[in-house]
Amino acid sequence: MAEAVSFRFGLYFFGSLYYNEENLDFKELMRMFQLGNKENKLSIKKIKELCLNYETISYFVCGVLTTLVDWGSFWLMDERWQLDYRITTALSWMAAVVFAYLVNKLIVFRKFRFGPSYLWKEWWAFFAARAFSGILVMILMIVLVDMLSWGTFYIGELKAGLYLAKALVSAVNLIVNYLFGKLWIFKKT
């Protein structure tokens, strides 16, 4: 019982940092997590609807495709062209940003406004958000590969440390980019 009370308190406390009690979504969220609530099955259904819908599933699929563009270009430039990992990270990031803009706009968030001024504003908002996450990616890669020496970890000839760092940084990047896209760039008006 004490664990349930502390969970509800934690949910209330941290939730209230972002929502006020007058917000219907916050009240509904609190009601969903009350123990002994007869509507718990309905609440679980609501949670599934929030998590498993067209937008989240298409974001996941397009995120996988964007990751393939990022990783494919990273691998090509690293293994075939033998470029420095910092240059490779920056160029693969740029390729992924252009691809991600197109699939996020057209497939995930279904924004079909194509007026020049609207596209310009939307692209720069998208690019600014991705530039922030791109800087974060570059900093994390440098910290992991150079400062923590992950770049020295090999399995045979495979640069295991470098690719492990890339995988970890890609996961962080996916979450940051979804939040920017959902809450700022392609928000519902």
Image: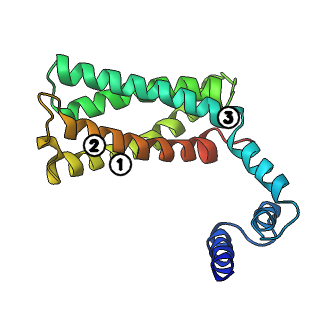
Q: Position of residue 103 (x, y in %)?
A: 56, 24
Contact? badges 3 and 1 (CB < 8 Å) = no
Residue 11, visible in the rendered structure: yes
The mark lying in front, picked from 3 and 1, is 3
When asked about the image quadrant of residue 96, the answer is top left
Mark sitting earlier along the chain (3/1): 3
In this rendering, the answer to whether 14 lies above or below 29 is below
Q: Nearer the viewer, mark 2 or mark 1?
A: 2
Label at residue 55: 3
Q: Is residue 78 left or right of residue 178?
A: left
Single out the residue that lies furthest toward the bottom: 2
The crowd level at tag 3 (other Cα within 10 Å; few <14, some 14-19, many 20+) is: some
| Residue at the spot 79% in from the left edge and 65% down from the top edge | 23
Q: Out of 14 and 103, give the one closest to the viewer.
A: 14
Q: Residues within 10 Å of mark 1 (few under 14, many from 20)?
A: some
Is 65 on the left-hand or right-hand side of 169?
right
Measured Cα–Cα span from mark 3 to mark 2 = 28 Å
Which is more toward the observer, 87 or 59?
A: 59
Q: Residue furthest front?
A: 1
- Image quadrant holding the C terminus, namely top right
Three-letter amino acid code at the position of disc 2: Ala
Cα separation, mark 2 vs mark 1, equals 13 Å
- The residue labelled by disc 2 is 165
Label 1 amino acid? Leu
- Residue at screen point 24% across, 29% down: 88
What amino acid does circle 3 point to? Answer: Glu
Residue bearing mark 1:
136
